[in-house]
């Protein structure tokens, strides 16, 4: 019995040590777990609305814009409720470039989706995110395979998806038939992606990063 207890304690120690090591290993990208945040830019369908209005279709223009506002409000509500990985700031897709060019620019939404100039970003490590539809992804982060899915894509300051094997997307449609899930589950899906990346990276990911010279302080056996 004592031997079994000893083996169990040793196993538990190894697991805790590996998790602790993964937490402290830097992967050469914005460490949003340490002094970081996500800038989530929301799309308003204003461009499609403007086109429809140009051709006199005010009814559908208002419908698209209303649906976009409702989705964005649901996103904000659900992120505030369920996402705890790091701070998240919400801004209009039409304003995100201005923030990228000037970090003092203040046009962020409050929880009621009203622009509040008292909200500012104090964190240094930033990743940008948005909802993308019919986004073509491929194996190993390429863009060759034909796989249209709905996703939250994670991007750098040029709004380019993070390069593979970084977690550049989180699928928000179902695996079967690619049916979009409810917006209320998006934060949990994104948090799972980030927690796996930071705390439980696969051996394959570690090997790839090691070959790229981006896995510091660790040599994969």
Image (cartoon, rainbow, N blue to C red):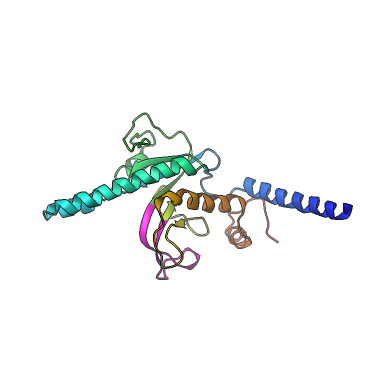
- Image location (x, y in percent) of residue 126: 46, 43
Residue at 76% of width from left, 49% of height from top?
13
Q: How many marks?
A: 0
The quarter of the image holding the N terminus is bottom right
Residue at 28% of width from left, 50% of height from top?
67
116 left or right, relative to 165: left
- Image location (x, y in percent) of residue 33: 55, 42
Q: Is residue 55 visible?
A: yes
Residue at 45% of width from left, 67% of height from top?
176
Q: Quadrant of residue 11?
A: bottom right
Q: Quadrant of residue 177?
A: bottom left
- Image location (x, y in percent) of residue 86: 51, 41
Q: Is residue 27 visible?
A: no
Q: Could you say which is closer to the camera, residue 174 or residue 100?
A: 174
Q: Residue furthest left?
A: 56
Specify start and end residues of the magenta stretch as a single range.
131-151
Q: Could you say which is closer to the camera, residue 94 or residue 208?
A: 94
> Is 8 inside the magenta-drawn segment?
no
Q: Could you say which is closer to the camera, residue 103 or residue 80?
A: 80
Rendered view: 168 above or below 35? below
Q: Residue furthest right?
A: 2
Rendered view: 9 above or below 134? above
The quarter of the image holding the C terminus is bottom right
Residue at 48% of width from left, 68% of height from top?
139
């Amino acid at each position: 019995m004592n031997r079994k207890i000893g083996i169990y304690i040793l196993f538990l120690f190894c697991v805790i040590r590996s998790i602790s090591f993964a937490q402290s290993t830097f992967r050469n990208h914005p460490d949003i777990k340490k002094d970081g945040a996500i800038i989530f830019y929301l799309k308003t369908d204003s461009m499609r609305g403007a086109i429809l209005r140009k051709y006199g279709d005010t009814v559908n223009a208002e419908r698209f814009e209303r649906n976009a506002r409702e989705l964005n409000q649901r996103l904000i509500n659900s992120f505030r409720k369920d996402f705890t990985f790091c701070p998240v700031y919400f801004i209009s897709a039409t304003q995100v470039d201005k923030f990228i060019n000037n970090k003092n620019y203040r046009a962020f939404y409050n929880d009621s989706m009203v622009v509040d100039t008292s909200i500012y970003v104090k964190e240094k490590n930033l990743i940008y995110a948005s909802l993308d539809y019919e986004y073509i992804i491929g194996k190993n982060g390429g863009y060759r395979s034909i796989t249209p899915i709905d996703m939250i894509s994670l991007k750098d300051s040029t709004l380019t998806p993070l390069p593979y094997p970084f977690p550049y997307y989180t699928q928000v449609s179902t695996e079967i038939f690619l049916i979009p899930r409810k917006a209320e589950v998006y934060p949990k899906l994104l948090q799972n992606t980030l927690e796996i990346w930071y705390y439980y990276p696969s051996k394959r990911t570690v090997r790839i990063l090691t070959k790229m010279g981006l896995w510091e302080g660790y040599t994969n056996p």
